[in-house]
């Protein structure tokens, strides 16, 4: 008999690992809202399977600090 993992456990594991990665990346970039990004990714991944997680992750990549600890700012004229 071959062990087959429960798909729900794998699904929540992927959602949890993705949220952990987003949290650690945001903390490393010194973002104040790291916890909210991680929660948003987890909820988006669970409520809208895969598509929600991809949407939140794309939005996070678009809005995160470009460099570690330095927010993006427009040049003054």
Image (spheres, rainbow, N blue to C red):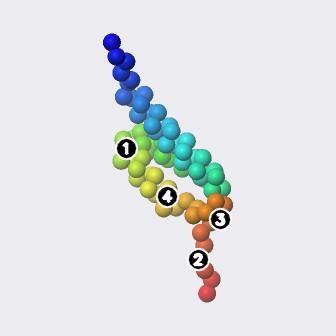
Residue lying at the far top in this picture: please name it: 1
State the separation of the CA atoms marked 1 and 2: 34 Å
Q: Mark 2–mark 4 contact, CB under 8 Å?
A: no
Instruction: Classify 31 as above or below 50.
Output: below
* Label number found at residue 74: 2
Where does label 1 land, which residue?
50
- State whether residue 16 appears in this view: yes
State the separation of the CA atoms marked 4 and 3: 15 Å
- State whether residue 36 appears in this view: no
Nearest-to-viewer mark from 3 and 2: 3
Q: Along the polypeptide, which appears first: circle 2 or circle 4?
A: 4
* Label number found at residue 61: 4
* Label number found at residue 70: 3
State the separation of the CA atoms marked 3 and 2: 12 Å
Q: Mark 3–mark 1 contact, CB under 8 Å?
A: no
Q: Quadrant of residue 76?
A: bottom right
Q: Mark 1–mark 2 contact, CB under 8 Å?
A: no
- Mark 4 surroundings within 10 Å by alpha-carbon count, few (fewer than 14), some (14 through 19), many (20 or more): few
User: Quadrant of the image for the N terminus?
Assistant: top left
Q: Residue at x 50, y 47 (%)?
A: 40
């Amino acid at each position: 008999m071959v062990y087959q993992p429960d798909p729900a456990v794998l699904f929540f594991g992927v959602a949890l690992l993705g949220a952990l990665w987003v949290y650690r990346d945001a903390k490393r970039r010194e973002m104040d809202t790291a916890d909210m990004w991680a929660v948003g990714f987890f909820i988006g991944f669970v409520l809208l399977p895969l598509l929600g997680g991809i949407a939140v992750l794309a939005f996070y990549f678009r809005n995160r600090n470009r460099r570690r600890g330095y927010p993006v700012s427009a040049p003054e004229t």
